[in-house]
Amino acid sequence: MRGRVTVRPAGGRFSLRLDLRAVAALVAIGGVALAGAVANVGYGEYPIAPLDVVRTVLGMETGDASSSFIVNTLRLPRALVALLVGAALAVSGAILQGLTRNDLAAPDIIGINAGAGLAAVALIVVLPSVPAAFVPPAAFVGALAVAALLYAIAWRGDGSPVRLILVGVGLSAVAVSLTTLVITFGEIRQVSQALVWLTGSVYGRSWEQAWSLLPWLAVFVPLALARAPRLNALNLGDEVARGLGVRVERERGLLVLTSVALAASAVATAGTIAFVGLMAPHIARRLAGPSFGGLLPVTAVTGAALVVLSDLLGRVLLPPTEIPCGIVTSIVGAPFFLYLLFRGRKG
Amino acid sequence: MRRRVKEGVIQVRNPVGVGLGGILALPLRSRGWLLAGAFACAGVLALCVLASVRFGAAEVGTRDVLAAFFAYDGSEEHLIIRTLRVPRALIAALVGASLGVVGALMQGLTRNPLAEPGILGINAGAALAVVATVFVFGASSLAVYAPLAFVGAAVAWAVVHLLGSLGGASPMKLTVAGAALEALFTSLTMALLILSQQTLEEIRFWLAGSVAGRDLGLLLQILPYALAGLTLAFVLGRRVTVLALGEDVAVGLGQRTALTRLAVALAIVLLAGSAVAVAGPIVFAGLVAPHLARFLVGVDYRWILPYSALLGGILLVCADVVGRVVLRPQELPVGVTVALVGAPLFVYLVRWRVRS
């Protein structure tokens, strides 16, 4: 087969087939994401040259005492959170799209974001005296609550993906309308603040948030990668998957759980950043092909690059105003997404 | 489905793919039952409208309601009934009917069971137009919002339809274009609202979707568009049924699909535009009503469309009444109640009725 390399160590206990196209895409986009992160860290009121950024992060001497504090304490966690959030949302979206065989499935559609949004907005507006540190856990609980409801309502043994999406849309509508209610009647200053959270932003994120997000990715992204072959099979349809020896219900349950956990942790950290979970898998699929083994890693780095670049762009566009990166992801992402789709479907 | 085969009708997979109708056995099948059901729905709608006139912030007796029409004496109650309650009830019914039909048309056109104005970018376009105007020119009124929202909705839908038809129309493209533009418009709106707290204060009640404080003038202004849209939609019923079977089947059956798509798109603009112009962006009514209709009548759009209109009207009028009654004298915007009332119903239907 052209463009594929099979790695089979002596002993033959396992083998790995690498799709060269996916590897190339992974390296290229990974490079973009890293460059974006470096630029993101370097940019600001106190600009730091890219080379110095890299040196500082690696702990080398740059001859500037203050840059270590600025880079390592103030800016690096923000860039890291952006990368992690992007990767989590993107993988979550890719899994859902594969499971439901629906190009539009994303954590936004099945209500995960809406649940997190409702919990966070309610906390910000209804209980303004509660410290801001409680918003992420509340959002996480909101996201999980919707996921649990979704599971309880939509699961009837067969775990039909169609029912999952339809019930998700219903739950999402309830959560969104309750959020609207809070926005409509809440005190205007808190509502304003809640809107910023709702659109998604990585402003002022610290190491604490980066560290609390990391374990989720460390557990669930490898889990998703390990499940890629089954996801490939499920994507062909339930009968085919069953014929190929996949335990459909169990695998689907695990994959949904993975997707939900990734989305919930991302949303809890950075608010509801729209469009990444929808767009990143599409971009990645055009670069790396449809097989999930190559697609999932490429999707992850694509999502990371999207969020980190959007955050940079949001700060560069209208200084000193910072546009929340969730707004940038949609404004930049939507046209680009359309372009990709229409270029890709001509044939 | 099984019984359809027995009747000797060609067995077709549900054209919407996963909607409720195709998965259920159809409860109403003969023309007589379908007609009777439609009349029953119309009766329920009339009762809902009456209830909407009867219940509200001010206490009004049933006798006052009748007297306001047959023995008008200019008292405060009669004034409330004639200038506030009746227009409001009629507007809710009209908006609900429009949304129901728009949802059904969109689901047929895109063959996507989730299509509705809130998902295909129309509501978001209208909201962006209104918010941008308020942002630039400051305070405004309902009378100004209405034409702006209509234009915004029409432009948004035109763009979605254009993008969805580039290089050969396909349902998938239309859905994706709609969802992408929806996200784009929504975040632009959010950006404006974040930049200007004043705009947020001004517009947030409108953005929730409401029929409060709409007068007869607004209803009359929008009525021709809505009626034209409804008529066009009902005329198109047979064509939409065929189109919903898929492009290839429709062409094979001799339909000029481009023409049908254009006509359906026009009906959607008229209906969705007038609904959002009067009541602001209301989501979910357009999703629930057609699914309920399909649950009752199956896959034939000649019946789905009128049923969607009636059920959409019932849903919106009921939601409006509930929103006024539960927190008296406070009032919930109908856009909020419609989702709170409709979503559990929808989830229930999906939970118990969808088998795949």
Image (cartoon, rainbow, N blue to C red):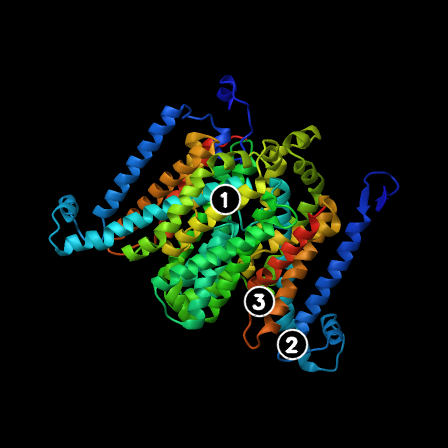
Q: Is residue B186 left or right of residue B76?
A: right
Which of the two residues, B138 or B242, is positioned nearer the viewer here?
Answer: B242
Whole-number angstrom distance, CA of label 3 to CA of label 2:
15 Å
How far apart are the two marked residues, 3 and 1, measured between alpha carbons? 48 Å
**In this orientation, does residue A148 appear?**
no
Q: Chain of mark 2?
A: A
Q: Secondary structure at mark 1?
A: helix
Within-10-Å neighbours for mark 3: few <14, some 14–19, many 20+ = many
Q: Could you tell me the amino acid type at mark 2?
A: Phe
Viewer-nearest residue: A169 or A304: A169
The spot of residue A194 in percent (x, y) is: 45, 63
Q: Amino acid at mark 3?
A: Arg
* Disc 2 target residue: A69
Q: Amino acid at mark 1?
A: Val
Chain for numbered disc 3: A
For the residues labelled 3 and 2, say whether their Cβ atoms are less than 8 Å apart. Answer: no
- Along the line of sight, which residue is nearer the eye, A341 or A310? A341
- Mark whose residue sits in front, 3 or 1: 1
Element class at badge 2: helix
Please give the residue where the numbered disc 1 appears in the rendered image. Answer: B264
Kindly report which numbered mark, 3 or 2, lies closer to the viewer in this rendering.
3
